[in-house]
Amino acid sequence: MAGYLSTHVLDTARGCPAQGVKIELFRLSETGDDLIRTLTSNADGRTDELVIPEDEFVFGSYQLSFSAGAYLASIDAYAESEALFDIIPITFKLTRHIHFHVPLLLSPYSYSTYLGS
């Protein structure tokens, strides 16, 4: 079994999935960070494709960057220039062949994440 990576974004202030959030995946290394993929959350707050599918899964350090400020401005939570969080980076290591699920729970003034399933 190969590993893979998925994510989703939940708007905890409104109690619904966060649609339209730009999500970038970077592979981190000592020589520089490489942008691997850019995705957008759908109506369910998930991406239409896996962030890292099984056939592209490689152990290493990664970062998911969520464009929270633009999303919150788009739903009129507040002006993008007033956003407390603009880009939310979540860094992590992929070290086993499992399903890594790294979600973002978002509100205008806080966020959290966890290893899901």
Image (cartoon, grey):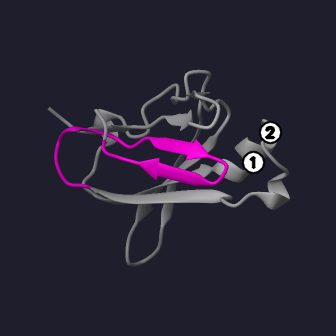
In depth, the one of 61 and 85 nearer the eye is 85
Queried whether the magenta region covers residue 10, the answer comes back as no
Residue beneath label 1, please? 70
Q: Is residue 84 above or below residue 25?
A: below
- Label 1 crowd (10 A; few <14 / some 14-19 / many >=20): many
x, y percent for residue 87: 63, 58
Residue beneath label 2, please? 74
In depth, the one of 77 and 80 nearer the eye is 77
Query: Left or right: where does residue 19 sit relative to residue 49?
Result: right
State the SS at label 2.
Answer: helix
* Residue drawn where x is 27% and y is 50% of the image: 58
State the SS at label 1.
Answer: helix
Queried whether the magenta region covers residue 110, the answer comes back as yes
Q: Is residue 85 above or below residue 22?
A: below
Q: Which residues are magenta?
A: 94-115
Q: Are marks 2 and 1 in contact (CB under 8 Å)?
A: yes
Query: Left or right: where does residue 109 sit relative to residue 101?
Result: right
Residue 14 image-quadrant placement: top right
Disc 2 residue type (three-letter): Ser
x, y percent for residue 16: 59, 26
x, y percent for residue 89: 52, 59
The residue most toward the bottom is 30
x, y percent for residue 65: 55, 54
Disc 1 residue type (three-letter): Ala
